[in-house]
Image (cartoon, rainbow, N blue to C red):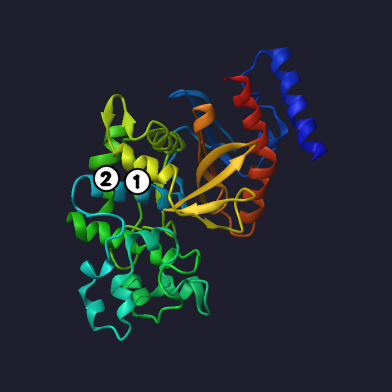
């Protein structure tokens, strides 16, 4: 890891010599052709914001699977407001047709299991794959009609197709599209004025990040700060402290093979200890991140280019090269 030490030493010298808070000329940022925008806040205040590669401020970016993390906040708000009883509610209430399915286990799958990626439902990584799923006129019904792959609650398997059901459920429970619910009870409360929530073929707003919600990087940072501040924003409760704490410190987590080394997954969020400190983060394909660092009272939001051929490399580069730089920067701001 000698290269990391060199990067951090270079940053420290630059800070001392120029007085800059974070040098835009740092190689991992200035020479990074994938990064679009970076917003860092600490103690509820934006301390760094910069656009790269010709991007404009407040551009709405493809947030990919950060959509899932935002959905988890919306599910919590729906629980707070009584639209949904609790995360252990069974999906048969919203899909009564499952009562006629040959496999009775389907109707007893819980919201919690879907959010933990442990529903046992068909997923788009099987033969036919994502293209088959996205081509369906009714992708949500298609998923529910397929045979279960595992007993619900037993096996972790990242599943975009199942996660989209959260949008269907939230829409049925509240009587309004997810985008409308989000604007009324989340975005407007945070001062987020613009969002573009894409729909799936079934007519429901995407719940997984395959079509995605498009938001500014500043908006992503605000959502992260909402959880950092335990559901509070400008003295107003937007989501309950109880739900914010559950998302940040879930009772059950499941190991993942991607993200920051040693990451665990629960309720549409990742959790890891980085340099001895707990970190909660959302992550989207290609290097979209919403990173919450309670010990540093900080949130890092970043959008990057969505390109399937380079997506994995972009995410690894952020985690292994860019984030250590940002971590060191936040240490200097404590």
Q: Residue furthest bottom?
A: 102
> Are dots 2 and 1 in contact, CB under 8 Å?
yes
82 with respect to 225 (left or right): left
Q: Reply above or below: 140 against 71.
A: below
Q: Residue 157 location in percent, x, y? A: 50, 66
Inspect this view and state whether residue 192 appears: yes
Q: Residue furthest front?
A: 251
Query: Which residue is denoted by mark 1 in the rendering?
Result: 73
Q: In the image, which disc is placed on residue 77?
A: 2
* Secondary element at image label 2: helix
Q: Cα distance, mark 2 to mark 1?
A: 6 Å
Q: Residue 132 location in percent, x, y? A: 45, 76
Q: Residue 152 location in percent, x, y? A: 40, 71
Q: Residue 85 location in percent, x, y? A: 22, 55
* Secondary element at image label 1: helix
Q: In the image, which disc is placed on residue 248?
A: none
Instruction: Please tell me which residue is depicted at 62% across the width and 45% down the height of the picture.
Output: 34
Q: Reply above or below: 263 against 188.
A: below
331 with respect to 216 (left or right): right
Q: Quadrant of residue 54?
A: top right
């Amino acid at each position: 890891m000698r290269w990391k030490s060199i990067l951090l030493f270079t940053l420290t010298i630059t800070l001392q010599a120029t007085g800059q808070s974070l040098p835009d000329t740092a190689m991992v940022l200035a020479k990074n052709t994938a990064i679009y925008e970076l917003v860092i806040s600490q103690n509820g205040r934006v301390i760094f914001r910069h656009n790269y590669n010709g991007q404009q401020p407040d551009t709405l970016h493809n947030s990919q699977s950060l959509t899932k993390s935002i959905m988890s906040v919306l599910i919590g708000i729906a629980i707070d407001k009584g639209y949904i009883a609790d995360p252990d509610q069974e999906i048969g209430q919203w899909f009564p047709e499952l009562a006629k399915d040959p496999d009775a286990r389907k109707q007893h799958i819980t919201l919690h299991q879907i959010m933990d990626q442990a529903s046992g439902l068909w997923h788009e990584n099987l033969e036919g794959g994502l293209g088959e799923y996205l081509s369906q006129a009714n992708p949500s019904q298609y998923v529910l009609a397929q045979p279960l792959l595992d007993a619900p609650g037993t096996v972790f398997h990242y599943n975009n197709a199942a996660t989209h059901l959260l949008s269907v459920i939230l829409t049925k429970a509240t009587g309004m599209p997810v985008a409308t619910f989000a604007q009324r009870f989340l975005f407007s409360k945070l001062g987020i004025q613009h969002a573009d929530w894409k729909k799936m073929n079934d007519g429901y707003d995407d719940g997984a990040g395959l079509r995605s919600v498009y938001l500014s990087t500043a908006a992503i940072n605000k959502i992260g700060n909402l959880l950092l501040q335990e559901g509070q924003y400008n003295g107003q409760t937007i989501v309950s402290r109880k739900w914010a704490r559950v998302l940040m410190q879930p009772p059950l987590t499941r190991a993942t093979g991607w993200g920051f080394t040693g990451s665990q997954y629960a309720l549409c969020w990742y959790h890891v200890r980085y340099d001895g400190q707990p970190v909660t983060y959302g992550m989207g394909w290609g290097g979209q991140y919403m990173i919450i660092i309670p010990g540093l009272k900080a949130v890092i939001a970043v959008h990057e280019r969505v390109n399937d051929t380079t997506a994995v490399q972009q995410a690894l580069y952020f985690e292994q090269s860019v984030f250590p730089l940002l971590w060191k920067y936040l240490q200097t701001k404590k």
